[in-house]
Amino acid sequence: MQFSEAEIAAFIQQYFLPFARISAMFMVMPVLGSRTVSPRVRLVLAFFVTLIAVPLMPKLAHMDSLSLASFLIVIQEVIVGLVVGFSFQVVFQVFILTGQIMAMKMGLGFASMNDPTNGVQTTALSQFFLMLVTLMFVSVDGHMVLIKLLLESFVSLPPGTWFLNASFFQSLSSLASWMFSAALIFSLPVLTSLLIVNIAFGVMSRAAPQLNIFAVGFPFTLVVGLMLVWFGLTNFVSAFEDVMAYGLFFLEDLLRIN
């Protein structure tokens, strides 16, 4: 069997461009993109997903293999994959930021530990929320839904065409403001309750100056904060559903999936 140079270039293009988008997402997406998963494992998974998905995709438009335009198209595919994975990392950061805000308010800010998934220092409460979200995300096959959205993007945003524009990155930047606002809304009941507790201790310190507020207020604030977090876990499932639904709708709009 003999293959011409054009046929080999077309075969590489048909598989390489989808592989660039899929592997870029696998490098930064939640769960699979954590530091606990080896980069070799992510590349192998991306390779097999590409082999399965490419025959189901529409045939890509032909373009020159070695040219500036083809290089820019490859960069675009990597950017799209990174944006998809990074968007859901931001969704996960909502719960981590919520734990940070609550922990700082209730006095658990000193109880920090190393996050094995991101390699940064976070509070113990943030790690607790992150473990809950990760388990729920995997249990509802969220990683499979994320891969499905990426594969559907090959129809709405076919490789080989230039579709990146200013609105694409502007929509991505708006996700950061949503992250802070959502984290503040989720932590607001705890913040409000602890504010009332601190006001009560302030009144007590004025009424009884000999009372050591720091010795009494710190453990009481910590216990009240933990009780509020415990009561708030009853609504954790609904909060998880709302955040994940927004993340999926955001990706569908960003990738122009109807």
Image: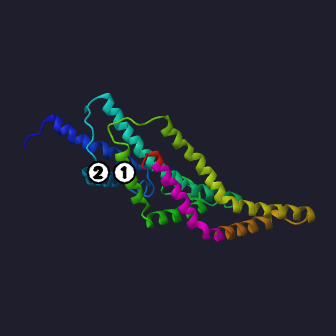
Q: Position of residue 71 (x, y in %)?
A: 33, 33
Q: Is residue 90 left or right of residue 52?
A: right
Q: Residue at x 38, y 55 (%)?
A: 148
Residue 99, relative to residue 62: is it above or below? Answer: below
92 left or right, relative to 62: right
Q: Nearer the viewer, mark 2 or mark 1?
A: 1
Q: Provide the major secondary structure of the magenta segment.
A: helix
**Count of marks placed on residues:** 2
Q: Secondary structure at mark 1?
A: helix
Mark 1, residue position: 152
Q: Residue furthest left?
A: 1
Residue at 35% in and 49% down: 22
Residue at the spot of label 2: 50
Q: Quadrant of residue 13?
A: top left
Dot 2 alpha-carbon crowd within 10 angstroms: few under 14, some 14 to 19, many 20 or more? many
In the image, which residues are magenta? Answer: 230-252
Q: Which residue type carries mark 1?
A: Glu
Vertical order, 9 against 197 (above or below): above
Q: Are marks 2 and 1 in contact (CB under 8 Å)?
A: no
Question: Which amino acid is tagged 2?
Answer: Thr
**Residue 118 seen by the camera:** no
For the N terminus, the image quarter is top left
Q: Position of residue 253 (x, y in %)?
A: 47, 47
